[in-house]
Image (cartoon, rainbow, N blue to C red):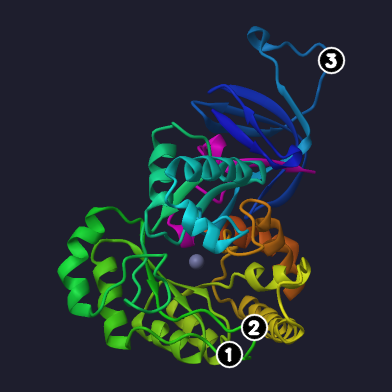
Amino acid sequence: MFISCSGEKTILAVPEQGSAIIGGYWTPDSGRVKGPVQLKWEEGRVSSLCPYSDHRGRSKSSGEEDFAWQPYLLMPGFIDSHVHLALDSIDFYQCLENWHNPALMEKVIQDNLRRYLESGVVAVRDGGDLPGFAWSAKKRLEREEWQGPRVVSVREAVARQGMYGRFLGRGFSSLQDWHRIKEDFFRQGADQLKIVVTGIISFSQYRQVGTVQWSVEELKELTASAHARGILVMAHASGEEGISRVIEAGVDSIEHGYYMTSRHLRQMKAQGIAWVPTVAPIGNLLKYPTGRYSEQEIATLSEILKGHLSRIKEASDFGVRLGVGTDAGAYSVPHGSSFLDEMLWLREAGIPEEKVYCLATQENARICGLPEYGKLEVGTPLNCLQLKEL
Ligand SMILES: [Zn+2]
């Protein structure tokens, strides 16, 4: 088995049973605990975590050596709650061409999966792709043919035919169309249901967002069909109208949510709806300039970013459930490394580091429906954890 070692940007092979001396640990409940601490594990799961003092003459049991992990802090692995494994963050249109070459795609995805683990990200939630590359990656990981984070996948998203999202799913022309196909849709596999509710935001016109694709009644039915199967609903929605509709429909998480309002936050708090604000796809365009965007677009993006960050801080202060998701695969949002960008954007919004860690682990585990992840306690599998630099 393995443990993610983000401290060295690597993945360490470890036996099913063993022990290590660590520099300290961090959990969402205890905060940071200084070491040295002795970690023991059995059958791949944490069995004890005790203060360590290296007494002279201390007898070692059966010649077993502790791993020397003093430079590291043991903590729950991060979870990226919004990625697209089938996109490459470099060239969207070239990437769609590459979809016709599955061998190439598999290689790219395998490399990206390794990058996640090297960055301390032990689970990701994938927001879908039409051919189902993320879903098949998930299956290969489950069969242990590949090494990488746990993948929670929607497989294919539900969008209105002819509107934004044709690379995310086949598209449905109407709700009747959906009802006719939904059994097959769920049968092919889905860990969550992703609904594309609005188009993307304009980079040149402030407040302009792509068309809202579904009515409140339609969204309620889509949501009910997922909830009836015990799965969560993630809704891609930006702009006043789109966000208002998904809140009324009672989805579980709102993805992106650009142009969120204070009124939305109050409603989301009351209903326990989570927000995954994906700052990196706009923030990174400003942080890593490329010359791809005009001055006017840069000015608009800056204005969007400013409003978005202050709304995120408001959400955090108000106690709205917040997730950390990058939208990795989008332009300038590379798989793995962009998770650090996203956490830094939340810091930039004014959320303290400890709280960002809680969101990136505990809250994201809840959003992704992964009860074993986002914590560090007796019984936690080692591959749900990471060794971070102290
Ligand atoms: Zn997405």
Q: Secondary structure at mark 3?
A: loop
Q: Secondary structure at mark 2?
A: helix
Give coordinates of residue 123: x percent, y percent: 52, 49
Q: Nearer the viewer, residue 241 or 60?
A: 241
From where the camera sits, is residue 350 visible?
Answer: no
Residue 52's disc is none
Residues in magenta? 366-390
Label located before the other in sequence (2 or 1):
1
104 w.r.t. 259: above or below: above
The reply to whether discs 1 and 3 touch (Cβ–Cβ < 8 Å) is: no
Q: Which residue is mark 2?
A: 311
Quarter assignment of residue 115? top right
Q: Secondary structure at mark 1?
A: helix
- Count of labels shown? 3
In magenta stretch: residue 378: yes
The reply to whether discs 2 and 1 touch (Cβ–Cβ < 8 Å) is: yes
Work out which residue is located at the far right of the displayed protein and give it.
56
Q: Residues within 10 Å of mark 1 (few under 14, many from 20)?
A: few
